[in-house]
Image: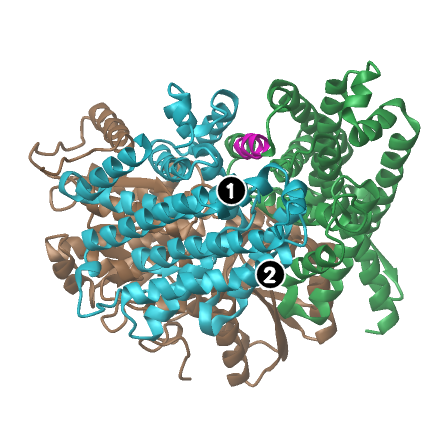
């Protein structure tokens, strides 16, 4: 029996909407009927606790696809996004991704939210002959021991975020640090990097505690932090746990005595915790205020569409889309083997400045940003402001490594 | 017997599936059969003995981690690793059942839940074996025994799963029709009476939990080399609840119903979530509808015109 | 930090957490005692409470409005669900309840997502309780004192309600013997509706009160339901006093366990539950063996 080609209803709706949009704008070029779309699979967590991050990443991809299609598509072919919800469950992610490959003929994947979803997916890429371009997956091992040839990471990794914070600490008068992380691979990875970096800088690392994901009461952890006598506490928390910690730390007036430091300051957390994060210093994968021509154009176009600034995961995912686009244009194809060669060593200017997709471990070398959370007159929510930028060669770890040499 | 005739018909149709279905449908079908095996194993406890387990994810997770670990760290052939993992789940279950059967009713359910959650906590903490929150990834399918490589292919793996499911079905069917099964039903209907007839009901319960876990473990052991990974989600309590729902929606105490229930549950979620982000809304409404209008589950619906065959 | 102030603040903190666990568990246990239903959707009502609290603060500017609106709406939805669906199922076995409340969890959870979106929402502390008090130079948030106090007040209120009011009497009688209450000419259905509504309302109240600590988010339901189960099981299904005792016990084990044995934080609650069940299979104050 021949394999029938399905177009899911969701896809048809998307094309219909895109078609309607195209019809209403006379300047938009039309695609030749024969042009087969470039399908990009997005098994993304839209529901469940990770839904907020997933929504940002999806928005960024849709924005990018709209821009690309408005300019005539990629290689003269329209870009079609195949978006399906995984609810953050790795088993569903693998199933959905496999469906996209086997049924929709997808050969490009992006937008997987959680690291454990990504880790479950990457071993399948060779069998699927598919390239996966990460949009936010931070686990250091994805470009280390778990690296596969078809995986690429244009985004900032967890260790890179921690490294930027550590570089900033070198110049700070604070001496003693404590850490609290999620009892999750990411929490442990990043804390290890922080500990090593702090010691290298001649600081005292007084210890760390790990809270299970889903912790609701942080009072005992706050007591531990306070008792440690540290001047700064390094947080590797995300999502609900991060929001709960920040809310409660404020209620305990923790930041009156101790500087809060964190691997990533994301706007969702700031919106959810009000003034609790003001004064916090941390890494940012993408601050919208970056002063370079590509970013200025991106932010302007974004604001025209959404009437707000792009958020951290949106900027990071958009960069990943730009890398994918440049790779496809360079390769002249979406075939995995050709695209892989094109992506290895690819250099381009993105929203974060000049980046290089290095060939050795498929991690993008890119600058690291340190931001401070402030609330200026007229702001509804506190916002991150860039206080330091570190060059790509200082932030990116050695190939396949999560530990830095100097 | 119409029951066995139906069974052979189903077996033939399923065996012919790879020749008629597109590649992706086979992926879904393989997963559905694995979940079907899991749900059927739970039916031994829920439907035949009235032991409502809230912790059946433990069986699945144990099997999945065990076979994943064996395949990653030894050169054991795939079928051997899978069977060893199932055996392990069954053996562990004897200990679990020994404790859980001290209680009855809801307390039993809650003890199974507590055990499953402890196992979940262990999987999170025992990094060297379970890979903590990342789980085990890149689980290979070793060839053998005797150099057999057919299970490494997609369709070959499907047949492995199918054989396991059919074998387990025949086993369960024989079990529930045997004197052993009669005692289980006695426990379901009236445990005190069964006890007074001289049966050590606790031993029977421990035995059925162990068998159920071994078959559930078999399902898990088949899942991890199929998906290539095993992680803590497979042990989470929510999954235990979902398996229980699969059994109920399919029709408890029928063996075949839970298999259908599992397939229905998985495929419905899969299809709905492809149509709409609000899939959970419709998913929930469909379950509520089932409770209200189809109290005997899917199998009950299918056989309601032939009440004689409600339980083949 | 000295031991005494540390112990004092952490004990108070444990009591504040116990209050939240109690709100969550007591409704579930009362529902089970009367109706023999394991309400899967209980955590979702808790989550609903948090989001309602957020909206109440947004619209009225008052946290207190949330404390009224949250339980009222939560309770009303619970009562409506009982009247519309559960009532038709009392002749069926527990699997029907499991499935219908599972369905409700999905439906209600999705409605919440559609109404309030995917992002976590902040619920500001009421001004009166935004401050801190110093206990032997140890700062302690006033809000947590308020929580502990609220727990005591609500516990006494429920106790008095069960002991002193006619409805309370009927609830206790129904949990002992529903047929007899029915034979006495009382509408048992009304008692059931009331208790399901009250139980869900209490869960929503817990959600409103928890929101300033953890924000209102879509992850709340899954986290809460398992806690609620544990409280109910340790305390003994159907036992009001048991749920109070269990909430305090679990909170103390969590707070001090997290402090002294952080590696066992995830497992502590379940180990406690296993221990209790092995010693007393029906829970601390449960009837069932």
For label 2, the SS is loop
Question: What secondary structure predominates along the stretch shown in magenta?
Answer: helix
Quote the CA–CA distance across marks 2 and 1. 67 Å
Tell which of A315 and C186 is nearer to you: C186
Q: How is the image coloured?
A: by chain
Disc 1: host chain: B
- Magenta-tinted stretch: C95-103
The residue tagged 2 is: A280
State which mark lies toward you, 2 or 1.
1
Q: Is residue A185 part of the magenta span, yes or no? A: no
Tell which of A42 and B41 is nearer to you: B41
- Residue A159 percent coordinates (x, y): 44, 70
* Chain B: drawing colour: cyan
* Chain A: drawing colour: brown
Q: Residues within 10 Å of mark 2 (few under 14, many from 20)?
A: some
Q: Is residue A193 above or below residue A108?
A: below
Instruction: State the mark number for residue B182.
Output: 1
Q: Which residue sits at x=42%, y=31%?
A: B311
Q: Residues within 10 Å of mark 1 (few under 14, many from 20)?
A: some
**Quick one: which chain is green?**
C
* Quadrant hosting residue B81: bottom left
Q: Quadrant of the C terminus of chain B?
A: top left
For label 1, the SS is helix
Position of C201 with respect to B84 (left or right) is: right
Q: Is residue B72 above or below residue C24?
A: below
Q: Which residue sits at x=66%, y=68%?
A: C262
- Residue C14 percent coordinates (x, y): 79, 56
Q: Is residue A103 visible?
A: yes
């Amino acid at each position: 029996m021949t394999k029938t080609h399905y177009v899911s209803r969701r896809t048809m709706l998307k094309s219909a909407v895109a078609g309607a949009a195209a019809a209403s704008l006379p300047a938009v070029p039309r695609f030749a009927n024969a042009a087969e779309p470039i399908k990009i699979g997005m098994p993304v967590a839209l529901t469940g606790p990770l839904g907020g991050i997933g929504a940002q990443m999806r928005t960024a991809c849709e924005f990018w696809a709209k821009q690309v299609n408005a300019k005539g598509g990629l290689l003269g072919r329209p870009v079609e996004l195949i978006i399906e919800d995984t609810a953050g469950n790795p088993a569903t992610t693998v199933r959905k991704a496999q469906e996209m490959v086997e049924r929709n003929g997808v050969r490009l994947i992006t937008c997987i939210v959680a690291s454990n979803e990504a880790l479950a997916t990457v071993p399948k890429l060779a069998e699927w002959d598919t390239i996966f371009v990460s949009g936010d997956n931070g686990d250091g091992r994805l470009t280390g021991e778990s690296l596969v040839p078809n995986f690429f990471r244009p985004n900032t990794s967890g260790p890179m975020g921690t490294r930027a914070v550590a570089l900033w600490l070198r110049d700070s008068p604070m001496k003693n640090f404590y850490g609290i992380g999620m009892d999750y691979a990411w929490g442990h990875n990043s804390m290890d990097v922080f500990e090593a970096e702090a010691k290298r800088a001649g600081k005292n690392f007084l210890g760390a505690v790990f809270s299970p994901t889903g912790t609701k009461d942080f009072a005992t952890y706050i007591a531990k932090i306070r008792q440690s006598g540290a001047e700064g506490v390094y947080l590797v928390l995300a999502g609900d746990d991060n929001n709960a910690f920040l809310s409660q730390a404020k209620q305990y007036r923790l930041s009156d005595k101790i500087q809060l430091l964190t691997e990533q300051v994301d706007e969702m957390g700031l919106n959810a915790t009000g003034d609790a994060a003001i004064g916090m210093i941390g890494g940012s994968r993408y601050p919208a205020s970056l002063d370079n021509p590509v970013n200025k154009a991106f932010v302007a176009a974004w604001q025209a569409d959404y009437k707000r600034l792009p958020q951290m995961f949106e900027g990071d995912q958009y960069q990943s889309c730009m890398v994918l686009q440049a790779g496809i244009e360079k390769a002249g194809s979406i075939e995995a083997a050709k695209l892989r060669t094109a992506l290895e060593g690819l250099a381009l200017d993105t929203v974060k400045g000049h980046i290089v997709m290095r060939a050795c471990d498929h991690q993008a070398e890119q600058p690291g940003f340190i931001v401070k959370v402030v609330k200026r007159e007229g702001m509804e929510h506190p916002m991150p402001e860039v206080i330091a930028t570190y060059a790509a060669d200082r932030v990116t770890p050695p190939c396949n490594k999560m530990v830095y040499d100097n | 017997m119409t029951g066995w005739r139906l069974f052979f018909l189903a077996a033939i149709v399923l065996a012919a599936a790879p020749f008629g279905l597109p590649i992706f449908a086979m992926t879904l079908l393989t997963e559905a059969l694995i979940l079907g095996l899991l749900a059927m194993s739970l039916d031994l406890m829920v439907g035949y003995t009235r032991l409502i387990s809230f912790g059946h994810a433990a069986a699945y997770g144990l099997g999945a981690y065990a076979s994943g670990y064996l395949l990653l760290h030894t050169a054991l052939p795939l079928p051997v690793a899978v069977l060893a993992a199932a055996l392990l789940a069954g053996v562990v279950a004897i200990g679990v059942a020994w404790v859980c059967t001290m209680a009855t009713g809801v307390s039993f359910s809650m003890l199974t839940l507590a055990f499953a959650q402890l196992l979940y906590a262990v999987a999170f903490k025992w990094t060297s074996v379970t890979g903590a929150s990342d789980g085990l990834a890149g689980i290979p399918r070793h060839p053998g025994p005797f150099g057999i490589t057919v299970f490494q292919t997609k369709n070959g793996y499907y047949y492995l799963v199918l054989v396991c499911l059919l074998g387990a079905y025949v086993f369960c069917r024989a079990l529930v029709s045997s004197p052993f099964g009669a005692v289980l039903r006695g426990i379901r209907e009236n445990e005190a009476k069964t006890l007074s007839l001289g049966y050590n009901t606790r031993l029977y319960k421990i035995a059925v939990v162990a068998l159920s876990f071994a078959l559930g473990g078999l399902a898990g052991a088949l899942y991890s080399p199929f998906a290539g990974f095993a992680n803590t989600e497979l042990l989470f309590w929510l999954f235990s609840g979902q398996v229980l729902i699969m059994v109920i929606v399919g029709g408890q105490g029928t063996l075949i119903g839970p298999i259908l229930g599992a397939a229905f549950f998985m495929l419905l979620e899969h299809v709905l979530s492809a149509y709409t982000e609000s899939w959970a809304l419709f998913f929930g409404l469909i379950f509520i509808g089932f409770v209200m209008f189809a109290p005997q589950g899917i199998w009950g619906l299918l056989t309601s015109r032939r009440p004689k065959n409600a339980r083949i | 930090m000295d031991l005494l102030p540390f112990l004092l603040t952490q004990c108070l903190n444990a009591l504040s957490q116990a209050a939240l666990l109690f709100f969550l568990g007591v409704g579930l246990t009362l529902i089970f005692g009367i109706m023999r239903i394991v309400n899967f959707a209980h955590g979702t009502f808790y989550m609903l409470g948090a989001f309602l609290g957020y909206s109440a603060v947004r619209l009225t500017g008052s946290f207190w409005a949330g404390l009224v609106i949250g339980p009222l709406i939560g309770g009303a939805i619970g009562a409506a669900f009982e009247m519309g669906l559960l009532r038709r199922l009392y002749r069926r076995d527990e699997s029907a309840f499991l499935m219908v409340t599972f369905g409700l969890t999905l439906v209600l959870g999705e409605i919440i997502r559609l109404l309030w979106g995917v992002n976590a929402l902040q619920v500001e502390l009421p001004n009166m309780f935004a401050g801190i008090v110093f206990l032997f130079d140890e700062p302690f948030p006033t809000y947590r004192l308020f929580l502990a106090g609220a727990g005591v007040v609500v516990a006494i209120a429920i106790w008095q309600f069960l002991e002193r009011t006619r409805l309370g009497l009927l609830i206790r009688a129904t949990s002992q013997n529903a047929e007899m209450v029915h034979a006495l000419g009382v509408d048992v259905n009304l008692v059931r509706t009331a208790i399901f509504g009250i139980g869900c309302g209490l869960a929503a109240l817990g959600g409103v009160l928890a929101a300033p600590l953890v924000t209102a988010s879509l992850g709340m339901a899954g986290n809460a339901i398992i806690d609620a189960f544990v409280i109910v099981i340790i305390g003994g299904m159907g036992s009001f006093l048991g749920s109070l005792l269990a909430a305090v016990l679990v909170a103390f084990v969590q707070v001090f366990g997290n402090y002294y044995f952080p590696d066992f934080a995830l497992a502590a609650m379940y180990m406690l539950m296993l221990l209790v069940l092995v010693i007393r299979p029906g829970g601390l104050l449960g009837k069932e063996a």
